[in-house]
Image: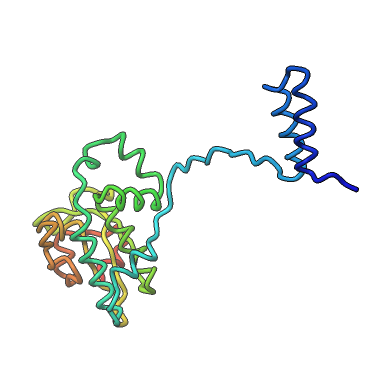
Amino acid sequence: MRIPSLFRIIILCLSLCIGGTFGFTCSAQVGAVISKHKPIRTKYPKKKVSNPTYDTKSLALKITCGKTSEAAKAEAIFLWLATHISYDNELRLNKSLQQKIYTSEENVMYHALQRKKALCGGYAFLYKQLCAEVGIKASVIHGTTQKYKATPSKNTPDHTWNGVYLNGKWHLLDITWAVSHGSLKNPQRFWYLTSPSDFMKTHFPKDMRWSLL
């Protein structure tokens, strides 16, 4: 007849306690017996994630909820970014922060959403990504800008904006200028689907095919 395991454990404890070693030996031996039936699980510390993920798919679906056409979805994304992400003057002036954030497009987008602030790259990368999440083709355009003049003053790109493909053709937009020329609550709508001739008065793409003229 086999002695039940619990009873065997009790007998083992009593026999070990006689030697005056109950405090340590008994508990250790009981643990060894129990471990045969229930393995001890070691808890390891969670790995630190240097750049947590963000769900642009869910955000895009939330922004475009109820919109049925691509044009309506593209405009909704433009308006959401222009009214929820403010212009990041701190990042513009802080070189060390720029080096930390501008390591990849993904990192720029992550910090823009976390900080709720962005520079032109953050706006442009997010617009392209959010459009892609709902099946709309968009592009990031790099170039130079100069107010009220017909020619750029330098060749090095200093600004980033977007093109979006709607109704069979490309259109131009600049979320950064919509915010900076208006306000976070009231962005300047002129910079959404702006006519190429008006856009080229101040924006000069590095790839001149994006002039759309």
Single out the residue that lies furthest toward the right. Answer: 1
Up-down: is 10 above or below 58?
above
From the top left corner, tell me how far across and down residue 56 is, in percent.
37, 61
Up-down: is 127 above or below 135?
above
From the top left corner, tell me how far across and down residue 146 is, in percent.
15, 53
Residue at the spot 31% in from the left edge and 67% down from the top edge = 209
Q: Nearer the viewer, residue 181 or 73?
A: 73
Residue at the spot 25% in from the left edge and 77% down from the top edge = 72
Residue at the spot 35% in from the left edge and 43% down from the top edge = 101
Q: Quadrant of residue 190?
A: bottom left
Going by the image, does 139 lie left or right of 196? Answer: right
User: How did the renderer colour the structure?
Assistant: rainbow
Total marks drawn? 0
Residue at the spot 28% in from the left edge and 68% down from the top edge = 63
Going by the image, does 19 lie left or right of 200? Answer: right
From the top left corner, tell me how far across and down residue 145 is, in percent.
19, 54
Q: Nearer the viewer, residue 203 or 87?
A: 87
Quadrant of the drawing holding the C terminus: bottom left
Q: Nearer the viewer, residue 211 or 107?
A: 107
Q: Quadrant of residue 142?
A: bottom left
Going by the image, does 185 lie left or right of 81? Answer: left
From the top left corner, tell me how far across and down residue 122 is, in percent.
29, 53
Q: Quadrant of residue 38?
A: top right
